[in-house]
Each structure stands twice: as structure tokens, then as C-alpha cells.
Amino acid sequence: MEFLDLTIRELHNELLKKTVTPLDLVKEAILRAKADNNNAFEYIMEKEALDLAIKLKEPEADNIFWGIPFVIKDNFSTKDVPTTASSNILNGYVPVFDATVVRKLMDAKAIPIAKTTLDELAMGGSGTTGHLGTTFNPYDKQHENIIGGSSCGSAASVAASIVPFALGSDTGDSVRKPASYAGLVGFKPTWGRISRLGLFPFATSLDHVGYFTRSVFDAALLLNLLAGRDLEDSTSSDVPVDDYTKLLNTDIKGVKIAIIKEIVDSIYDKSINAAFQKTIASLKIRGAKVEYVSIDRKLLGALFPTYVVISCAEATSNNANLDGIKFGPYHQGNTYEEVMNKARSKGFSELIKRRFVIGSFCLMRENQEVLFLRAQKVRKMIVEKVNDIFKDYDAIFLPASPTTAPKLGEASDRLSDEYLIADNHMVVGNFGGFPSITLPLGFKKNLPFGGNLTAKPFNEAKLLQIANVIEDITGFYNLSVRNKKI
Amino acid sequence: MKEINKIVLKDAAKRLLFDMSEEEYDTLLNEFDVVIKQMELIGQIEGVDDYEPMTFPFDCATKYLRDDIPTKPLSKEEALRNAKNKSAGQIKLPKVVG
Amino acid sequence: MNFEAVIGLEIHVEMKTRSKMFSSAPVEFGAEANTLVSPNDIAFPGTMPTVNKQAVINAIRVANALHMSIDNTLVFDRKNYFYSDLPKGYQITQNMRPIGREGYLEIKTDTLRTIAIERLHLEEDTCKQLHFSEYTLLDYNRSGVPLIEIVSKPDIRSGEEAMKYVEAIRSIVIYADVSDGKMEEGSLRCDVNISLRPIGIEKLGTKVEIKNLNSIANIQKAIDFEIRRQEGLLLTGNPIIQETRRFDEALKETITMRVKTDAVDYKYFIEPNISPINLSSDFINAAIASCPELAQVKEKRYLEVQGLSERDANIILQSKDLSKYYDDAAKHTNHFKSLANWVTGEVMAYLNKRNIPIENFFISPSQLGLLVNMIEKNEISNKQGRDIFQEMITNATTVKEAKEKLKIGTQINDDNVILTYVKDILDAFPDSIKDYKDGKDRAVGFLVGQVMKRSQGKVNPGLTSKLLLEELKKR
């Protein structure tokens, strides 16, 4: 059956024509999920999904998500469905409420079929640190290459055509980086555009709900559904929700695109550079003005440590509720400290503990000024600089990653001396809450790589317009392991 | 800034209520080394301390305040469902002193 | 060497809003454990705080009553620490920008003193712990209840002043309709910070903290004891240990709870889950205007405008509900002193005897006002008034109904009419005239009684007495 290889929009048409039913789709998706050997799943919601699918009889013409199966990164709260954030400290935790985005999708009759793996507590970028081990890249059957993270399972599910879209979260590039390694559209909107209620927080001021699709149009459709003020999320925006498909397929004459010279200069891969330049040339032909801008190298070099300090500090606090007392595995002890200590010592991995110590250290009274607060100052500097660029340009376009998916073992979550500007620039999208999208740009040795487009806050329609043109230029529409166009 | 050594790190871990092995502390010391070096470089960026620390990605100030209307709470069963150590409708802990 | 006590108080006030500070779970007292819990209050992953408007309004009311400047942007901070009663592993509070700053409170002991108040801020309560010998139970009903914390500058100098200060704060939060202010129930909590220094020296001594005080009287006793204890140590050259102590009611002494090590580092940072909230001046002014009248304002009116005695004013102000009753009744009569007499006398006697709260008192304020007016206009006598009062509460009637039922006509105040009765009675009881002339004053009472009887109780007894005496002199 090829229906799951379609995009949301195409699949909706098939459902309307009744060439396929939601039950057919769900059954097939679950089959594929069970057959998946990339270690993408924490929990397959077989019974739950079938129960929902059986009830859907009459397709709704004006509801594009009716009957569409999807998967959810396991750091979103799902009522009555186990949720672990891929951490042992949450083994056995079954939430009593749904995340807002899950609720919105289910109200629209979309059908969740599984919870996907992630780097533990979303704190990673390799897809290797979850408690079930490494999630692999469907593009590499030898399982030598990672898919990146932290939204590894969601990326793998969409790249393998198990479902046409998947929920993820993006705190430092956790949707947009794996999207590059897996040849997908990976999108996160402006901070606060989509409610974070029910998303387990990693670093609150950097966290975004994001998702994977196989077309820009699908990404726009999802945004139409998920965007909007949620009174239960005090940071969700009341900026009116647009129709994010309105500028799609319109021409981009006069659109101004900036390229940050120092970032491109730090990318050495010839294939990636060639594809990138080719895309730029085509954009120019379509009428866009594409120009190089400059950001002080020192400032760019500060991106990664600034991210480490802010995210570790906030994460330490955000995960202080994980103590085995209210939920998660409980360990006997003589005092409440012992009970908490055992739960946290056994439940957190080595990597997570190290991150928490770093975060805690940055917040200590004696250190806050030169570590946490200074990192927040750098954040301000960077965001101001990028906002300056957006005064004159509609978007910033860059390669999403300096390489294709790294080999397992090559990627390490240990902080190393070699911060790669090229590897971490997308965190700018989190610092300033800028809407940002990765989409496929090309292939090298059968592994995909992507380009990343970023616009100023609440300018998603413009961003998607330009992204749509790029998709048209590259022809990489609905790319998956089954549909690959190498 | 506090000096970074195993004693300080062990104390920090203790306050975070978890234990780490000796090897982990060694790895952590190396990581700290990197972070601190990087933060020192940041300190050299001209004008950085002239900026205000930024908590939110942009100005997101609002007027909204929630009306004081109670909503249906969780049932006792839902609230305690995930707790493993319970007694008489409450969560149970070893005797808390001090 | 003479020492002076340098005392600062930290008061936590539990607010009686309908929902919690950062979640919409209900706030109720005495509910079954863990039945007032939202996912937020038990810190399930992915939950987020939302700010309670009424809690903010309440904080503004109190800050205003304390003459504080009010910040027009609401920003919250996280106070990070681990404890069994703290589900999130941090408390949302206001460290950097408290909503109220730099105010004061006047208290009266034998002098009038101004106590400076440093800050007033919003935060959330922890869950409740029930301790048994081998284990502790956690009830999350209280987790997230809105709190106001008020921190004074160390201007207080004695246990008595501390008591007055707490009483004044309690009065404000009760009358502002913000809290029940009951220390025994925990809706008002007070921590004391106290050190001693030689008079004339600016340097502060070692500070001792006293916690878990459960009544205002105990605050004074604890402070008085602690001053003596510290004085004793200092005079004998012993150091004061920096520690936290509690007050033992039975021993009437403060006792060590735990010795303080380094000050805890709470690693405060701005709460990123709550966007800053702009409070317009309209909002702030409306919050201030919404505050019910405070006791201090009422007292001024009672003493200076209505001419009530201090005693009556104090009794009425003892209870917010009683003062409300009095104020409502005072809208229906100008005879304030008489009204106060009735409220502090007959009404309170009845309420105390039956153990009924004033909210359940049958006679409405307007009816009481009507009754007082009738007495003061001499339409009925005081005794008749009391009879009507009893009839009303016994048989649930109005003033009019009771008066009719008891056949209390309008009192006779006409001198001529009364004189006719008087003359008749004097004619009928010549022996009594003789008794009076012989110096037996009791005869007057007897004769007045006869006039009352003859007139079916309608004559004004005072007038009757006066006219009788005049007539007796003539005979």
C-alpha cells in the first residue's frame, strides 16, 4: 500500500474519495512501525489507534487532518499513554492529561499511532542517548549513521514513511537538524506561536513545538491547525493566527534573502556547498535578491557555549520535579532525601547528570554574573544583530548542517573544544524565537542534507512562501526512503 | 567565580540529589574546562556587559491575568495514580524531620 | 550595658481566593486530602503556571494599605531547592521585583511608632505534610494556594510592638477581604528575626530566627523570652549562635530547631514560563478602589464622626462581620451611640448565648436601625424596645409585626395626658403620697408603675416620673 507514502494533502484527497479508510491507514502504519528496525519507538499505540480509526466513517471535506495517522515525540504528555521522555526516571509514568497540540490534532480526528524515541529528556543532538539506545537513520540500512536529535524517532518515522507527519520539539535545533540528516521538512514556528502546554520542558525560553513533514505545504497546514493562543500557556502569543498557506505558490520577486558569510565559510563539504550555491542561483532567477551579510566571528563562536549555559541552567530547574515521589520508579530510603537521591541517581543517565551539574554551577550565586547572566547578555547581542539583518532582509538562508548524517561514534554529546559554528548556528532560531525551517537540498553518497531558512518573529507565511519556492527549485517534494530521488 | 574542583562538583551533585561515579566526575571536570574556556572567550567580546541579560526571546509582555474561577480538579485517584508509595489517600514518605 | 532588640518580621498570608495562584484548581479548607489538585499543583511534567487575577488584586489592596509603591510590571522568579513539600523542586515567587516596595505601618503601644516595610510579594504555598512516628504523608490540596509575603525592616523593638504589628497586618488582610488571618489555622504565619545590640551601636548582632509560632500571644512571649535569653548570653560574654528556634508553649521558652549553616543559595532566575504582565494604572487603581473599608478608617469614623466610645468601637471592630452589620444599620439611623449600645449589648449578648455568628442573626441591620429610631424618637420606651427585640428573634417577625403583636401603641409623651393619669393615680393612692412625704422614695416608683398600668404601659416613664414629682410637691 502506498498511501502512507503520500503527503497529508494528497492523503486527505484519497480519504475523501474513499480509496482508503482511516482503519486501513492505521493498520498499515502499525505494521510498518512494528517492522521498523531503526529503534524509533517507545510505545506503539496499537489498541488506542485502532479504536479511534474504527469510529471514523464519514470523511470531513473541510478537515484535512481527518483520519491521518501521525506519531508523537515521547516528551509530549499523552493521556493514558505511557510517556517517558526516553529517560528511566519516567519509566511507567502514564499522564492524566494531553498536551494541547495532541488535543488539537485528536480533536481534528488525526490518529496518533506511536510515541517516538528522543535523546534523553530532549537534551541531546545525536539521537543516541535515549534509554532505549540509538535511533538509526532509515537512509542507512547498515546502521552506521545517526539521524541526529533530539527528535530522532519522529524523524525516522516520517523518513521511513510510517506516517506523513510527526510531532517533535526544538530547543537548539532538535527538529531542524535531524530534518537535514533525514531529508525532511523540519519546522518550528515563532516562540509562543504554538502552545507548549504538555511539552516536557527542557529549556523553557528556548523550547518550541516543531514537527516533521514531507512537504512545505503540509507544514503550513499543520501550522494553521496548531497555532494560536492557549490560555493555559502564559507564554503563548495572542498575535492573530494567519492562513499560512496564503503565500504558497506566489512568486518571490523582490524577496530579500541574506546569507551569513562566516557560517558558509566554515562549511567545507563540496557537495553541500555546491547544492547550496545552485539553490541560491535559482532563487535569484526567480527574482529574489540574495546577498551576503556579516556577523562578527567572535559572536558566532559564542553561540554554542551560550546555548550550553542557558539550556543546562534552565534544564536543571525544569527537571527538579523528577524525584520518584509523585510519579516514576520509587526507591525505598530512610529519609526523603534518600528516596529522591536514589530515584535521580538511578533514573538519570551520566550525560544528563553532567548537564545538570553544569547548569546548577552556572546559576550559583558566585557564578551567575559571569556565567548565566553573561550568557543571557550574549543572547541579547546575537538576537539584536539578527533582528538588524531582518530590518533589511526577509529571511536568512544557510546550509542546515556542515555534513550529512555523522557516523555513530563520530557524534559525541561530550562537550568538546571544537565548537563548530557550522554545526550549531541554528540555535539562533531558538535564541530569538525566530520561525525556522529545514528542507532537503541534496544528497551525498545516498545520504540527504538540507538547507535552513529563518525569518523574523510571526513571519511564518513569508518563511513558508520562500521555502515552498526552494522545494520547487530542488524538486525534493515528498522525499522519503521509499520515494527517494537520488 | 567559584573554583572548579571535584569537591565543588560533588557538593553540587549532592545538592541536586544524585550520585555520580569517580569517572563521571573526571569527565565532568574535562567538560567544565571546555565550558569555562569558552565563557572566557565570551567575556572578551567587546561591549558584552553593556547589554541587559535576556530571558525571553523577544518582548512578549502581556496584560492577561486569569479570572479567579475554579475548574474541576483531578480526582484523587488521578492525582495519585502514578505515585508508588501511598497510604490513606496521600503520598507516603519516610518521616520528614527538620 | 543596655541592649536594644532589633526585630524584623516576615509574615505569610494565605489568600482566600477561589482558585490557586498559578493553577485554576479550587481553594477550599477542610477538603479531603488530594481532592483539590490540578496537574500543575503536583508538578506533572509539561504543566505550566497561569497567574490568578484576584490574587494580584488582593496583593495590590494590601500593598496600598501599607503605603507601598506598586510595581506596574509583574515578573516572577524561581526559587530552586529540594524539599518533600515542594513538588516542582522550585517555588515560583518574586525575588527581584516584588509587587510592593517601601511602605510602612503605624502601631501604637505607649507611643506611636512607624515600622518600615521593605517588600510585599506574591508566591505559592507548598503542600501539607502530616507527620507520624515512622512516616510522613503528603496532601497536595494546599500546594499552589496564593500567598502574600510581607517583610518588615528590622524596626521593631519589643514583643509588644511585634504583637501590635501582626495585629495590624491581620486586621488589614481580614478587612481587605484577602484572608481569614487565622494563625491557629495557618492562614497567617509569622517568622521572627531577632538580634540584640548595645544601645547606640549601629552594627547588628547575630540574628536568630524563630519559626512555627501559632498565635499572636506566642509571638510576644517568644520574643520576650528570646530577648532575655540573648541578653543573658551577651552579658556573660557568650556568643549568640546563628540558628532557627521554635517556641515551646508549655515551657514558655524558645528552643533550638536547627543550627544555620551557610545561607542557602536558591539560584534565583526569572521564571521563563510566565511572560511579564503589564498592570495598567487603571487596573491598579481599580484594585485599590475595590478594597473594602479597612478597620482603621472605620475606627476614625466611629470615634471622630459618630462619637462612639473607644470601648464600643473596639468591640464592634473585633469582627469584620460585626462591623459590617453595624455599618449597615448605621445607614438607617443617626443615633449612633444608641445603635452601638444595642449592637455591643443586646445583639452580642444574644449571639454569644446562642453561639450564632452575626451573619446568621435574624434581625436585619435596617430593622435594628428602625427600632433604635423608634426608641430615640420616644415613640416607645427602652423596655418596650427590648420586648420587641425579643419577640422578633423568638418568633421571626419584623419590628412592626412585633409591636402590633405586643400591643405596644405609640408612647404617650403629651404632658397634659400624662398629668391626667398622674392626678388620677395620686387621688387613688393617698397613702403613697404620705409615704413619699415621709421620705420613702420607693413610693415614686410604685406610683409611676401604677400610671404605667393604668395607661397600659403607654406613658413615657421618664416624663411620668418628672410630672409625678412636680405634682407630689404640690400636694
Image (cartoon, rainbow, N blue to C red):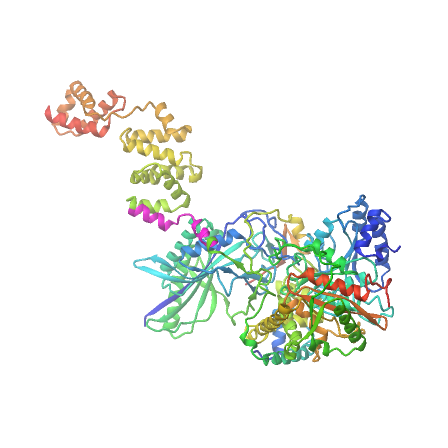
Q: Which residues are magenta?
A: C283-304
Res. A363 image quadrant: bottom right
Would residue A429 be found to the left or right of residue A131 on screen?
left
| Percent position of residue A220, x then y | 73, 57
Name, please, the residue furthest toward the right: A1
| Percent position of residue C81, x then y | 58, 65
Quick one: A353 or A15, which is closer to the camera?
Answer: A15
Q: Is residue C319 visible?
A: yes
Residue drawn at x 50%, y 69% as measured from the top left: C259
Res. C356 image quadrant: top left
Which quadrant would the N terminus of chain C be assigned to in this image? bottom left
Q: Is residue A152 visible?
A: no
Quick one: B95 or A154, which is closer to the camera?
Answer: A154
Q: Is residue C316 above or below residue C196?
A: above
| Percent position of residue C222, x then y | 41, 60
| Percent position of residue A466, x then y | 73, 64
C298 in the magenta segment: yes
Quick one: A139 or C40, which is closer to the camera?
Answer: A139
C349 in the magenta segment: no
Residue drawn at x 67%, y 71% as measured from the top left: A355
Would residue A212 be found to the left or right of residue C410 on screen?
right
Is the magenta region chiefly helix, strand or loop? Answer: helix
Res. A221 image quadrant: bottom right
Which quadrant would the C terminus of chain C be assigned to in this image? top left
Name, please, the residue furthest toward the left: C474
